[in-house]
Amino acid sequence: MIPGHLLTSELWKQQEQHLRPHYPCILPEIPEAETIREMASMILDQIPESFFLAGLSMGGMIALEILNIASERVLKLALLDTTAGPETMERSRQRTEFLEDAERQGFEKTIEQRWIDLMLTEEGRKQEELPQAIMRMASKVGLERCRQQVRALMARQDNREMLTSISCPTLVVCGEEDVLTPPEIHREMAENIPNARLELIPGCGHLTPLEAPDRLNDLMLEWLEKA
């Protein structure tokens, strides 16, 4: 289970607790590397020969790159709150502004002011432990690795055409209120992946593992157990 940009393996804490009695879980951090492909290769070096693969946001982009490198090793795939497309001009502008603010006013203050609103719904932001978890993970990643991850995100390739070649059973999950990678992106991915199941989670934003842990736990266990 691969986390997203400015997130750590803590993202999957509740899924790990739910799944570990049934399946061994490996929760790699996003490696320190300059490209998505390098990150994918480094994760492949850490894990067994065959595996089930899940990734959220940037983690989903890394998961697709893992498929590009070694699709024969991936038994099942779960793509959560992510995109197969390239960087857009709007997202590139937002990332640049984020880094400029972080340099000017401080990294953690910028996370608090600009990042949490993109990650959570209004209801999620009212739950004190969720913003705290985001702050904790982002602080652990830090500004220097943030810059590195942004460079990799901005230079990533367009993987939309490879979706039709995915042959393993695939679960596509998105929060209905995800403003970063909205439901229509996931509908398009699910339509193009031959053996895909789409699940939209109501009342949830970009971080489904935090905002809808029980629903996601059920979906992931079902995905793992389905023949």
Image (cartoon, rainbow, N blue to C red):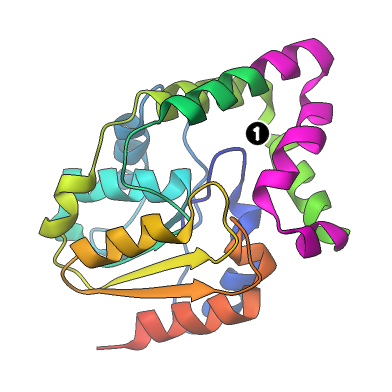
Q: In terms of secondary structure, what is the magenta stretch mainly?
A: helix
25 vs 43, left or right, is right
Residue at point 58%, 71% (across, down) = 15
Task: Give the percent coordinates (x, y) of residue 134.
Answer: 73, 47
183 vs 118, left or right, is left
Instruction: Report helix, strand or loop for mark 1.
Output: helix
- Residue at which label 1 appears: 141
Q: Is residue 13 above or below residue 140?
A: below
83 vs 26, left or right, is left
Residue at point 61%, 44% (across, down) = 7
Q: How many marks?
A: 1
Q: Is residue 137 above or below residue 96?
A: below
Q: Is residue 188 above or below residue 91?
A: below
The front one of 34 and 81 is 81
The answer to whether residue 201 is seen in the rendering is yes
- Crowding at dot 1, Cα within 10 Å, few <14 / some 14-19 / many 20+, comes out as some
Q: Is residue 150 above or below residue 212?
A: above
The answer to whether residue 33 is seen in the rendering is no
Task: Give the percent coordinates (x, y) of residue 176.
Answer: 55, 66
Q: What type is the residue that disc 1 sits on?
A: Val
Q: Quadrant of residue 152?
A: top left
Magenta highlight on residue 64:
no
118 vs 108, left or right, is left
Magenta span: 99-126
The front one of 227 and 20 is 227
The front one of 88 and 227 is 88
Task: Give the percent coordinates (x, y) of residue 142.
Answer: 69, 28
Magenta highlight on residue 105:
yes
Residue at point 29%, 38% (across, down) = 41
